Image (cartoon, helix red, strand yellow):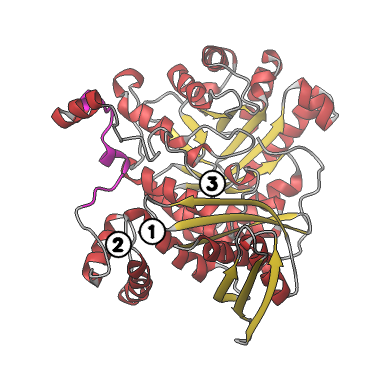
Amino acid sequence: MANDRVRFLDTTLRDGEQSAGIGMTADEKLEIARQLSRLRVDIIEAGFAASSPGDFQAVSNIARQVRGPVIASLARAVANDVDQAWEAVKHAESPRIHVFLSSSDIQVLHQLRKNREEVMDMAVSMVTRAKRYCSDVEFSPMDATRTNPEYLFQMLEAVIRAGATTINVADTVGYAIPSAFGALIRDIQRQVAGIDKVTISVHCHNDLGLAVSNSLAAVEAGARQVEGCINGIGERAGNASLEEIIMALDTRKDLFKVDIGVDTTQLYPTSRLVSRITGMSVQANKAVVGENAFRHASGIHQDGVLKDRSTYEVMRPERVGVPGSSLVLGKLSGRAGLQSRLEALGFKLSRDEISKVFESFKLLADKKREVTDRDLEILMDEEKRVAGEPVSYTLDHVQFVGGDHNIATATVRLIGPSGDVLSDACTGNGPVDAVCKAIDRVVGSSGKLVDFNVQAVDEGLDALGTVTVRVEKDGKIYTGRGAATDIIVASAKAYLSAVNRFLAADEASTLPAVGTTPD
């Protein structure tokens, strides 16, 4: 359907979660979905309902509670997947089933081990099945950019006849280059019967660093739905960065001549939320949402910006929601100043909530000369994390000794599930190792620390530090986060967060490898 409106499908909660080491709880997914609704994306791909009971519940929760966007679930071209997708999204205000199936000879022959005719029958059969449940059905030929064009056109015609309303051309392995991808979209419009009755979508991966460029080339060629992830997270090198595509279309309206329905002022808050929940930091020079996106170091640039920001900025920071700051918060600040700053950052709190946060703020302010916006974001993340996580143990006290000539030793005191106080000590090859081993001794269970990341939130020796850990337990990866002005304390919080997650994790079996992986 050719028109001047480009719709956005956000797949942060599905393809984004396929980033190595990411694991989000159902509550965290719901929090991101609500923020995506405030961003006014058109479609939220809430997950892959058939992949596990936990993912089914997360998709179902979003379908029931988030209003505004279309809520979609991915499904392989398998009857049970389609059925589970519908059961998960059926309570949505606007539900969608998204069916995908490999189309390239490489994947059809070597992964599915079927012939083209069998795959064509699977595509038509499952789109037909989805259509019986739901009027809004999307179909993705996976690895479309390495698919024989004639076979691709035949498959698209067949699924359109079966009832697909959106056709998603997936550059699953990031193989395309912009000129060829734009040509493919134009060829589809010329060669596929019925294509004018459906929406052409694109889903681009970033293996060659071209996902955003390919997506924009597709829009120029006539695609009117674009799929991507916030911050460009996703499988391997990630997906197209949704915020970059949105701002390219918004900034260069003169070239693209399309409308978007997104509230661009929610891009920065959404980016920060996704970064905090996933534990994947945004690089400083990241376009649109990076810390340096609106910073100017060169004297010539600074002079120009002081005279007129348009000399060296093609978009204003407030256009993407980068907050300005007129209040300096510290230990003498009151509730009103804190609440005003939190509201400017997008946090809406009740009177009881602001009182609780104010206590944590004062504790932090006693340790820091000045509390920054980034500190407040981390503070709020800590409050939500503690409130939303399954909690078996809470950290009460950490003490450690170390040095280049001493054996690192840590003592931890935890509050157990029944309120009992438990403590133990352990040595390690460093203070973090000793703290983790001491926690393991208290809880009577252990995981393997496979990733440890520490980041200063802002500048200075009194900076608040955030620690993200990934812990492997029984073949599964659990993410934990913690923040404190002391990195060892932050590490203890992060590791205990991961421990609580694997202690509370359900033991449901994972999705069997009976077909293929999502695009």
Q: Give the secondary structure at mark 3.
A: loop
Q: Depth check: give the residue in front, 519 or 333.
A: 333
Identify the residue at image location x=46%, y=26%.
1
Mark 1 lies on residue: 462
Residue 155 occupies quadrant: top right
Residue 67 is at least partly visible in this image: no
Residue 268 is at least partly visible in this image: yes
Q: Give the secondary structure at mark 1.
A: loop
Q: Give the secondary structure at mark 2.
A: loop
Label ID, residue 280: 3
Amino acid type at circle 2 is Arg
Q: Are marks 2 and 1 in contact (CB under 8 Å)?
A: yes
Give the position of the C terminus as an image quadrant.
top right
Residue situated furthest left in the rendering: 307
Q: Main secondary structure of the magenta part?
A: loop
Identify the residue at image location x=40%, y=38%.
290
Region rendered in magenta:
310-325
Q: Is residue 205 left or right of residue 326?
A: right
In the rendered image, residue 157, in percent from the top left (x then y), is placed at 64, 22
Mark 2 lies on residue: 369
In the rendered image, residue 127, in percent from the top left (x then y), is placed at 67, 37
Residue situated furthest front in the rendering: 405
For the residues labelled 2 and 3, the Cα–Cα distance comes to 28 Å
| Residue 260 painted magenta | no
Amino acid type at circle 3 is Met
Identify the residue at image location x=36%, y=40%.
262
Amino acid type at circle 1 is Asp
Q: Is residue 119 left or right of residue 399?
A: right
Decide which of tag 2 and tag 1 comes sooner along the chain: 2
